[in-house]
Image: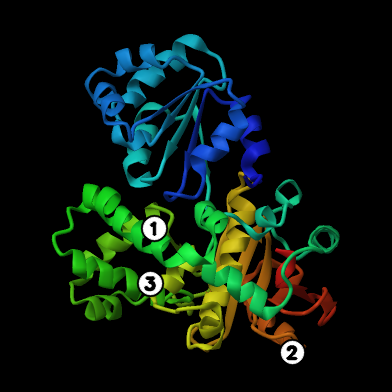
C-alpha cells in the first residue's frame, strides 16, 4: 500500500473543518487513503451499496442516525439529499472532523456543497499515484517551483527515481492507477478496458444519458490523441461525427471528473494578442496510451505522440505536487500570435515562473531567450526551468535551470 502525500493535509483539515470532501476520478485511491488516515476510528459506509443509497435518498436523517459521525461516506454524489442533513448536524455539534466524504462525480457534488455546506467544508482533489508517492517520497513532496530551494530539496530526495528515457516511458505507458500498478503491466489492457466500460456505464451515462455509446468511445480516443495540444472543438466534433454542443458537454464531464485538465492561457488586459484557446491534458497517461492504441512503452516512445505524452505526464506530475499537498495550482501557458510559446507558467504571488518540457538530455541554452517574451506581461519573472532528461540539475543561464524529470 502506497503512502500518499495528502495524508498529512487530511489530518490538518480534519482538525480545522467539520466536513472534508475528497474528490477525484474512480480508482485513484480515495477510499484507501481515508482508511489509512482514519486508522479504524471512524464508521464507514459506501453509497455504491444500493440499500445504503436508498436509505440516504429516502430518509437522510435516519441514514445519519444509522451511520453516526465521525463517519466516512463514500460516493456521496448518489445521495445529494444528505447535504442538508449534514448541515443540521454540523451546526448543532460544532466539532471538527465529523464527516469525511468522497465523490468521483464532481459535477453532482458542487451544487449541493455550495448550497448547504459553504464555509463548513474543505475540498481536496486526488489523482493517481505521483512519481514521488511511487518512489516512497510522499512525505517529502513539495509543490513544484523552479527555485534553488526546491531544486536542492529534490536533489536530495529523488535519488531512487527512474532517470532514463525507457524507464520513464514505461511509467508513462502504464499510468498511475494504484490497483493497476500493484498488479503490473500484464493486466494493463484488461484494467483499462474495464475502466472505460465502467466509467461509461456508471458515471457518464448517469449524467448525460449518452444514446450513442460508440460515438462516446470514439470521443474518448479523440480526446486522448489530442493531449498536450490546443483544444479545437470543431476538429474534435468532426472526428467524432457529433456536433460542437455535444463535444463541449462531454468534455465538461471529463474535466469535472478529473480525467482531463484544460490549461488556460495566461493573459492580462494590457496584452491583447494572446491566444485564448486552452490546452488539453489527459491526466492519466496510461489510459491515454490505451485509448490511442499504443501496445507497449517502446512504441509509445518512438511514435508520433512521444513528445505530447511526455509533456502530459510532466504536467500531471506538477499538478499532483500541488493538489496532493492540498494547494491550489495556479498554472497557465503562454502563446501569442507571433508563435512565441512557453509550455507552463506557474503564478505565485506577483511572480511568474516559466517552464519548458523537452524530450532531450542536452537542452539548448537558447531556451532562456524564449522566456523574454514574457517581459511584456508587466509581472515579475522568477527563475525558469527546462524539465528534461539531464542526469542532474544544470544551469543553462543565470535565470534558467535544466531539471531532471526524475526530480518531480
Which quarter of the figure has residue 64? Answer: top left
Question: Who's the residue at 61% across and 44% down the image?
Answer: 326
Q: Which residue is mark 1?
A: 255
Disc 2 is placed on an element classified as loop
Residue 214 % position (x, y): 20, 69
Residue extending farthest to the front is 186
Give the Cα distance between marks 2 and 3: 33 Å
Determine the secondary structure under disc 1: helix
Viewer-nearest residue: 266 or 305 = 305
| Residue 229 appears left or right of 134 | left
Residue position for label 3: 291
Sequence-earlier tag: 3 or 1? 1
- Residue 165 position by quadrant: bottom right
In the structure shown, which secondary structural element does the residue marked by tag 3 occupy? helix
Q: Rounded to the nearest whole Å, what is the CA distance between mark 1 and mark 2?
A: 35 Å
Query: Mark 3 or mark 1, which is nearer to you?
Result: 3
Q: Which mark is residue 364?
A: 2
Nearer the N terminus, badge 2 or badge 3? 3
Residue 245 visible from this viewpoint: no
Q: Position of residue 157 (x, y in %)?
A: 81, 57
Mark 3 Cα-neighbour bin, 10 Å: few <14, some 14–19, many ≥20:
many
Amino acid at each position: 500500500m502506497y503512502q500518499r502525500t495528502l495524508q498529512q493535509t487530511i489530518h490538518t483539515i480534519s482538525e480545522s473543518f467539520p466536513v472534508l470532501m475528497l474528490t477525484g476520478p474512480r480508482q485513484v485511491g480515495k477510499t484507501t487513503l481515508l482508511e489509512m488516515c482514519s486508522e479504524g476510528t471512524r464508521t464507514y459506509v459506501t453509497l455504491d451499496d444500493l440499500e445504503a443509497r436508498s436509505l440516504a435518498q429516502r430518509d437522510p436523517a435516519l441514514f445519519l442516525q444509522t451511520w453516526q459521525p465521525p463517519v466516512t461516506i463514500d460516493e456521496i454524489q448518489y445521495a445529494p439529499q444528505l447535504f442538508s442533513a449534514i448541515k443540521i448536524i454540523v451546526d448543532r455539534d460544532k466539532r471538527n472532523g465529523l464527516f469525511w466524504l468522497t465523490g468521483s462525480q464532481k459535477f453532482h457534488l458542487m451544487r449541493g456543497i455550495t448550497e448547504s455546506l459553504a464555509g463548513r467544508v474543505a475540498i481536496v482533489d486526488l489523482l493517481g499515484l505521483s512519481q514521488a508517492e511511487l518512489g516512497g517520497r510522499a512525505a517529502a513532496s513539495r509543490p513544484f517551483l523552479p527555485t534553488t530551494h526546491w531544486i536542492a530539496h529534490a536533489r536530495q530526495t529523488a535519488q531512487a527515481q527512474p532517470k532514463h528515457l525507457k524507464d520513464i516511458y514505461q511509467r508513462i505507458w502504464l499510468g498511475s492507477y494504484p490497483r493497476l500498478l500493484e498488479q503490473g503491466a500484464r493486466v494493463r489492457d484488461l484494467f483499462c478496458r474495464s475502466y472505460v466500460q465502467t466509467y461509461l456505464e456508471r458515471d457518464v451515462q448517469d449524467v448525460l444519458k449518452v444514446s450513442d455509446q460508440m460515438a462516446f468511445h470514439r470521443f474518448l480516443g479523440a480526446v486522448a490523441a489530442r493531449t498536450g495540444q490546443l483544444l479545437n472543438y470543431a476538429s474534435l466534433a468532426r472526428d467524432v461525427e457529433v456536433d460542437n454542443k455535444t463535444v463541449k458537454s462531454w468534455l465538461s464531464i471529463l474535466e469535472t471528473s478529473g480525467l482531463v485538465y484544460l490549461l488556460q492561457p495566461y493573459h492580462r488586459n494590457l496584452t491583447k494578442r494572446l491566444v485564448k484557446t486552452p490546452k488539453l491534458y489527459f491526466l492519466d497517461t496510461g489510459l491515454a496510451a490505451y485509448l490511442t492504441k499504443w501496445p507497449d512503452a517502446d512504441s509509445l516512445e518512438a511514435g508520433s505522440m512521444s513528445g505530447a505524452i511526455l509533456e502530459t505526464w510532466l504536467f500531471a506530475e506538477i499538478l499532483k505536487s500541488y493538489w496532493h499537498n492540498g494547494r491550489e495550482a495556479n498554472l497557465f501557458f503562454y502563446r501569442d500570435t507571433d508563435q512565441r510559446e512557453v509550455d507552463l507558467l506557474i503564478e505565485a504571488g506577483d511572480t511568474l515562473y516559466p517552464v519548458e518540457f523537452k524530450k532531450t538530455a542536452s537542452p539548448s541554452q537558447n531556451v532562456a531567450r524564449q522566456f523574454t517574451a514574457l517581459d511584456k506581461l508587466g509581472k515579475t519573472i522568477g527563475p525558469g526551468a527546462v524539465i528534461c532528461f539531464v542526469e542532474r540539475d544544470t544551469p543553462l543561464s543565470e535565470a534558467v535551470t535544466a531539471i531532471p524529470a526524475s526530480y518531480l
